[in-house]
Amino acid sequence: MEMDARPEAYLPKNVLPWCLLLLLAEEEGYGYELHSRLSDLLPGRWDAGTLYRSLNTLEDRGLVGSRWEASGEGPARRRYAVTERGHTALAGWVQAVAGVNAVLLGIIKRYECGVQPAGHRQAGIGSDHDEAFWVRRILSLGEQSPV
């Protein structure tokens, strides 16, 4: 079985709305601005239609509000902002994902501590001579920020 090496292939399917809420919690914005800011946060390509459908769904659920603002050039633009309900929902989601993150980090740590296919185990792993290296490696993984 071939595994997809792209990180975005393993993201939850519903991560886009949460990323939009986070971006809007950081700073209100227009759809076009959010589209460009999203690329810094989330791997992959997101078309404008998907982004606006997600914003509309967030607004329908009361997590985001919007208002029309006049533009110095061209037509009025819609400015989006997170509501109190959106801040609460985002905080709950982040807490839940942090729990999943802890489980995934535990799996990664265990793998990196020497789990190898049978017959491919490296010499010295698990010996007293090598123990200090693995303790340092495990401790350094725990220091990495989940965000």
Image: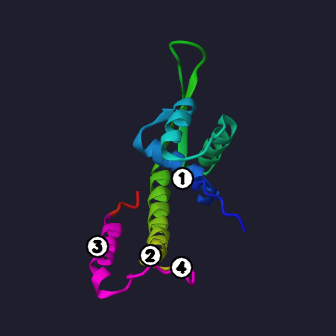
Q: Nearer the viewer, residue 100 or 108?
A: 108
Q: Nearer the viewer, mark 1 or mark 2?
A: 2
Question: What type is the residue that disc 1 sits on?
Answer: Trp
Element under label 3?
A: helix
- Name the residue rendered at 49%, 54% in the picture: 85
Decide: few, some or many residues near mark 4? Use Cα within 10 Å; few <14, some 14-19, many ≥20.
few
- For marks 1 and 4, the one nearer the N-term is 1
- Say the numbered circle drawn on residue 120: 4
Q: What residue does disc 3 label? A: 136
- For marks 1 and 2, the one nearer the N-term is 1
Measuring from the top left, give residue 96's x and y in whole percent.
Answer: 48, 68
Cα distance, mark 3 to mark 2?
Answer: 15 Å
Decide: few, some or many residues near mark 3? Use Cα within 10 Å; few <14, some 14-19, many ≥20.
few
* Count of numbered circles on the image: 4
Q: Which residues are magenta?
A: 116-143
Element under label 4?
A: loop
Measuring from the top left, give residue 133's x and y in whole percent.
Answer: 30, 75
Q: What residue does disc 1 label? A: 18
Cα distance, mark 1 to mark 4?
Answer: 41 Å
Q: Nearer the viewer, mark 1 or mark 4?
A: 4
Q: Nearer the viewer, residue 50 or 137?
A: 137
For the C terminus, give its image quadrant: bottom left
Is 140 in the magenta? yes
Is 74 on the left-hand or right-hand side of 133? right
